[in-house]
């Protein structure tokens, strides 16, 4: 499978990257993982939005889902008609979250005409096996694993320290893990990981390759990589906008 980073800026868009968004493709089947601020713009560089097969949201913080409002505009008013409804898997309340974000008057929207809503459940997603694990964040949040042809990608979403995340990422070929906090910042438990913790989670999971992401605009990807490498005990890469990883 191929992973393309649409955006990787943590907690908000930054000067060089949209917020969280990732495109995963295998044999023409396209899955978008998260769609935060600005990620829908970046998506259009890689694929027509109507050609996406499924969107999977880790959680409903704005930096992971708010560009669904723009997706709806495109599907509803754009010139291209989708061949079918786009599967949209997210935590319970995703439809209401999108409706509220889109329309301040809370009018009834035809969201279900465009999106086929579902909640996280292990199963099949096109050619992929998809698995979820609840993680440790102030709102319901999930880590996501996609597997196909004996290869697997695990994505942390946003989380503090989590044994469930370690289990979900077990022996993943690529572990895309958040590393929001730097070691010299005040640490807030049950919210995000440090680079060191991301590395330790990857090591415990036996992940084969670690890519850190969700570094905020005030942070440093180089610092996150160095701290994560110390925890992982092996070289680590950082997500960057437009980066492509073959898994
Ligand atoms: Zn976030
Ligand atoms: Zn979050």
Image: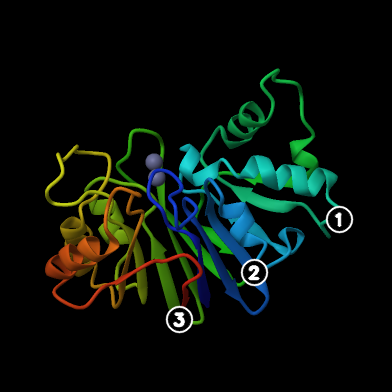
Say if disc 1 is inside 8 Å of ligand 1.
no
Residue 60 in sight: no
Q: Nearer the viewer, residue 113 or 148?
A: 113
Q: Residue at x 19, y 65 (%)?
A: 228
Q: Which residue is mark 1?
A: 81
Ligand 1 located in image quadrant: top left
The disc at residue 137 is none
**Against 186, is 5 above or below?**
below
Choose the circle earlier in sequence order: 2 or 1.
2
CA separation in Å, label 2 and label 3: 25 Å
Q: Residue at x 51, y 51 (%)?
A: 121
Q: Which residue is mark 3?
A: 150
Q: Nearer the viewer, residue 73 or 247?
A: 73
Q: Residue at x 52, y 47 (%)?
A: 36
Q: Using a 10 Å C-alpha cutoff, classify the residue at mark 2 as few (fewer than 14 neighbours), some (14 to 19) or many (20 or more).
A: few
Where residue 44 sits in the image (x, y, percent)?
67, 62
């Amino acid at each position: 499978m191929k992973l393309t980073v649409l955006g990787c800026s943590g907690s908000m868009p930054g000067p060089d990257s949209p917020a969280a968004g990732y495109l995963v493709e295998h044999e023409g089947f396209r899955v978008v993982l998260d769609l935060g601020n600005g990620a829908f713009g970046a998506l259009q560089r890689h694929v027509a939005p109507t050609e996406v097969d499924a969107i999977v949201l880790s959680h409903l913080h704005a930096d992971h889902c708010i560009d669904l409002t723009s997706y709806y505009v495109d599907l509803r008013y754009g010139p291209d008609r989708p061949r079918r409804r786009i599967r949209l898997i997210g935590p319970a309340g995703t439809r209401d979250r999108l409706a509220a974000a889109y329309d301040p008057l809370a009018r009834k929207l035809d969201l279900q005409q465009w999106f086929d809503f579902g909640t996280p459940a292990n199963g099949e997603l096109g050619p992929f096996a998809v698995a979820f694990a609840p993680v440790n964040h102030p709102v319901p949040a999930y880590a996501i694993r996609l597997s196909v042809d004996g290869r697997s990608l695990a994505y942390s979403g946003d989380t503090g320290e989590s044994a469930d995340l370690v289990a979900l990422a077990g022996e993943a070929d690529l572990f895309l893990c958040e590393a929001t906090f730097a070691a010299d910042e005040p640490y807030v438990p049950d919210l995000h990981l440090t680079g060191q913790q991301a590395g330790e989670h990857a090591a415990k999971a036996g992940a084969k390759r670690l890519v850190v992401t969700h570094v905020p605009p005030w942070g440093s990807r180089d610092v996150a990589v160095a701290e994560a490498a110390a925890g992982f005990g092996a070289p680590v890469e950082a997500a960057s906008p437009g980066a492509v990883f073959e898994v």
